Amino acid sequence: MEWYSTERRCPPVSLRQAVLEGLAPDRGLYMPERIPRLPESFFEELPGMDFVSISRTVARAFFGDDVPSADLDRIVEETLSFDCPVVPVEDGIWSLELFHGPTLAFKDVGARFMARLLGYFTSRSGEGGTVDVLVATSGDTGSAVANGFLGVPGTRVHVLYPKGRVSPIQECQFTTLGRNISALEIDGSFDDCQALVKGAFLDQELQEALRLTSANSINVARFLPQSFYYFYGYAQMAARGKAGRLVVCVPSGNFGNICSALIAKRMGLPVEHFIAANNSNDVFFQYLSDGVYRPRPSVRTLANAMDVGDPSNFARILDLYGHDWKDIRADISGFVADDTAIVETIADCYRRTGYLLDPHGACGYRALKAGLRPGETGLFCETAHPAKFKDTVEAATGHPVPVPARLQAFLSGKKAAVPLPAESAAFKDYLLSLA
Ligand SMILES: Cc1ncc(COP(=O)(O)O)c(C=O)c1O
């Protein structure tokens, strides 16, 4: 299968090239030339299938032309070394828990898949050398990518994060690893970090000096595998007889996660409707209301990983729907939870149900409480473990949040980060020093 750029100003490329390049040369995002529709028989069998078997089928539909089945199956199996269970929260509302991976956030799925697919391509190329993986993070991507690539031969990972804007636990998860992982503490916002990464791909001198790729959700190998757990979430709901009129709510920042859910729907997944839950960074919500996209600088919120003012994957949503605002609105509605609402929701949900939400999941849960119609069942993504946002969650509930051992282990490491201003020249110098 070939992959085209959403900007359509450069020719389509192979999967290998799309994965290695990350961003297309015309600054567009790669999309599959067609979205395969899975057969009816697959959906009939879905409720009885396990996570790995479901994901193998989905992965083959996109990547099967380019990666032999045995390799692809192994990549899927190694990626999914943990479960993504659905858990009832209250009548009609379920949580799709995506935080059971090594870094306790949904990014583990895409990051582990991408590390392995990239490893497959570089090991086969026979070109040797090193691939430099650039990743901008608003919190969780950095740790998932860093941990996914830790020790992968032929790769160096550079994590750019906004100084003072990620939680202390998140920071430990990518600044303490050493080996092939470096952390860059950028004096700016997530949008600045993302702009530095995008700028590096368009710099001819850097392109000639290094083999750069991006591990943000702009990379197809990061964003598409996220569709696996929507099929699996649906399968689990169907097995419980709860998938009749399913509304899926995705706490959204850069919109990679919801994009993979929309692609799952195009592949035939019978989801009735989607809700994109935002924090106060509500450019998508505004777009839904009047059809005008007005990116703006992000503001800090308690759901910091969603502090994005110009979501990259908006381009993919536009492309998927042929830029038709009405069609987009027909499939997706929006919701906004400010910090006050986030705290209230964590407290209220815990008090009434005993379920602990993290600040991102809280936006999703609240959106379902507000938006579900009679007869619908809601499934929201719980995108990170509440212990990653311990201070906020404890302040809201008044109860201690136990920290899982694998998260605790990160806290004992020694922080190492390179401080940099949010300036492309400084970032370029840093990268050239590696060449
Ligand atoms: C915990 C958490 N929730 C939600 C999001 C938003 O996901 P996306 O950027 O794919 O919209 C992120 C992204 O960093 C995250 O880390």
Image (tube, rainbow, N blue to C red):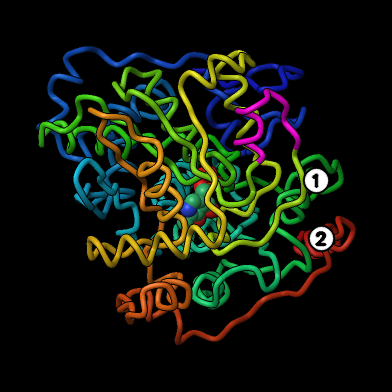
Q: Is mark 1 on a helix, strand or loop?
A: helix
Q: Is residue 43 left or right of residue 37?
A: left
Asked if the beta carbon under badge 1 is closer than 8 A to the nearest atom of ligand 1, the reply is no
Where on the picture, by quarter, is residue 386? bottom left
Q: Can residue 313 be seen in this view?
A: yes
Point out the tag, 2 or 1, that comes first from the N-terminus: 1
What residue span does the magenta drawing correspond to?
283-294
Residue at 45% in and 87% down: 412
Residue under label 1, please give it: 199
Q: Can residue 132 be seen in this view?
A: no
What secondary structure prevails in the magenta region?
helix
Q: Is residue 261 left or right of residue 356?
A: right
Where on the picture, by quarter, is residue 379? top left
Q: Where is residue 75 drawn, in percent x and y?
A: 34, 43
Residue 35 drawn above or below residue 215? above
Residue type marked 2: Phe
Asked if the beta carbon under badge 2 is closer than 8 A to the nearest atom of ligand 1, the reply is no
Residue at 78% in and 68% down: 187
Residue at 75% in and 39% down: 295
Q: Are marks 2 and 1 in contact (CB under 8 Å)?
A: yes
Residue under label 2, please give it: 427
Residue situated in front as seen by the camera: 70 or 173: 173
Residue 312 drawn above or below residue 119? above
Residue 64 drawn above or below residue 120? above
Residue type marked 1: Gly
